[in-house]
Amino acid sequence: MKSQVKWIGEEMFAGISESGHTVVLDANAGKLAPSPLENILISLGGCSSVDVVSILQKARQNITGCTVEISGTRVDTVPKLFSDIHLHFVITGENVSEKHVARAVALSADKYCSVALMLNKAVNISHDFSINTP
């Protein structure tokens, strides 16, 4: 897998994936686009959500929505790395089993999500969930 990042002016950069997709990044505190660190949180949430939805669908859970709210805490020193990241999954559906959601979230965090497994080596990642009915 390859990608490229090009400076496009001021503090803006374009990340181009091997598949030809472009993501704009703003190093100026994310004023015009996500900052690189915001993009890490988005990538973690996306990777985890893919797993959770797939696992719940395979378990024949009647889900109609999955949102993950991600919060990251950074250290005060430079470089301002993440010390902690918390993911809160909000699953929507009819008769969704709490046991199945707990299992899906744990499997994503501990076994399947590549982004979480890489970050876990340096960042304390926690997660929880809630279930809403439409």
Image (cartoon, rainbow, N blue to C red):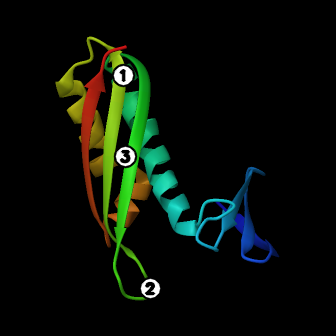
Q: Is residue 111 above or below residue 104?
A: below
Q: Quadrant of residue 16?
A: bottom right
Number of numbered discs overlaid on the protein picture: 3
CA distance for labels 2 and 1: 38 Å
The disc labelled 1 sits on which kind of residue? Answer: Thr
Residue drawn 31% across the image and 16% down it: 133
Residue drawn 37% across the image and 34% down it: 52
Q: Callout 1: few (<14), some (14-19), or many (20+) C-alpha neighbours within 10 Å? A: some
Give whichever of discs 3 and 2 has the lower sequence position: 2
Q: Is residue 31 above or below residue 104?
A: below
User: Residue 60, position in %: x, y?
Assistant: 34, 14
User: Residue 70, position in %: x, y?
Assistant: 39, 51
Mark linked to residue 54: none
Question: Helix, strand or loop at disc 1?
Answer: strand
The residue singled out by tag 2 in the image is: 79
The residue singled out by tag 1 in the image is: 92
Which residue occupies the foreground of this view, 43 or 131?
131
Question: Helix, strand or loop at disc 2?
Answer: loop
Q: Of the residues tagged 3 and 2, which is closer to the observer?
A: 2
| Farthest-out residue, front | 31
Residue drawn 34% across the image and 27% down it: 91
Q: Callout 2: few (<14), some (14-19), or many (20+) C-alpha neighbours within 10 Å? A: few
The residue singled out by tag 3 in the image is: 112
Which residue occupies the foreground of this view, 73 or 19?
73
Q: Of the residues tagged 3 and 1, which is closer to the observer?
A: 1
CA distance for labels 3 and 1: 22 Å
The disc labelled 3 sits on which kind of residue? Answer: Tyr
Q: Quick one: quadrant of the C terminus?
A: top left
